[in-house]
Amino acid sequence: MSYPPGGYGGYQQPGYGGGYGGQVEHPQGTMVLVLGILGIVACQLVAPFAWVMGNRALEEIDRDPLRYSNRSNVNVGRILGMVGTILLGVTLVLVVLVIVLNVVLIGASSST
């Protein structure tokens, strides 16, 4: 016996989409992935947003795993957000060190 898509005997659980097995993609899944990629490639300032949004989306997916189907995309975006945030921190530390070094060198050369 073959059943129609969307449930057994036409029954579909309330609140679930009509995707395979009633699953739909998490609404923020693609955005988290795009922000994570942009956080690595183009603008590290968006990486923390990918990390935070990815954490929230994963919590929602874990709360209702039968509803959402794109956990792996959200997880990849979250991890890229973590890496981008670490790179942002390293960049900021290096910029501060360069500024401090320049101030020290300028101060030392003007006092002699």
Image: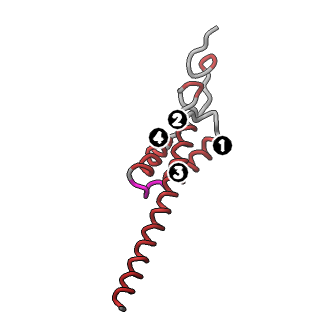
- Report which residue position mark 1 lands on: 63
Disc 3: CA contacts within 10 A as few (<14), some (14-19) or many (>=20): many
Badge 1 marks a residue whose secondary structure is: helix
Name the residue located 44 percent from the left edge and 50 percent from the top edge. 40
Q: Is residue 89 left or right of residue 59?
A: left
For disc 2, the marked residue is: 25
- State the image coordinates of residue 76 (x, y, percent, origin top left): 54, 42
N-terminal label among 1 and 3? 3
Residue located at (56% from left, 43% from top): 75
Q: From the viewer's perspective, is residue 91 above or below residue 62?
A: below
Up-down: is 31 above or below 5?
A: below
- Tell me which amino acid carries mark 1: Arg
Image point 53% across, 39% down: which residue? 73
Q: Quick one: label 1 or label 2, which is nearer the N terminus?
A: 2
Residues tagged 1 and 2 counted as in contact (Cβ below 8 A): no
SS category of the residue bearing label 3: helix
Residue shown at 63% from the left, 33% from the top: 66
x%, y% of residue 43? 39, 54
- Point out the frontmost of discs 2 and 4: 4
N-terminal-most mark, 4 or 3 = 4
What residue would you read off at disc 3? 53
Q: Which residues are magenta?
A: 43-47
Between label 1 and label 3, give the one nearer the viewer. 3
Of labels 3 and 2, earlier in sequence is 2
Question: Mark 2 Cα within 10 Å, few/some/many (few <14, many 20+)?
Answer: some
* Residue type at numbered disc 4: Thr
Q: Which residue is mark 4?
A: 30
Amino acid bearing label 2: Glu
Locate residue 79, reporting x and y percent. 55, 47
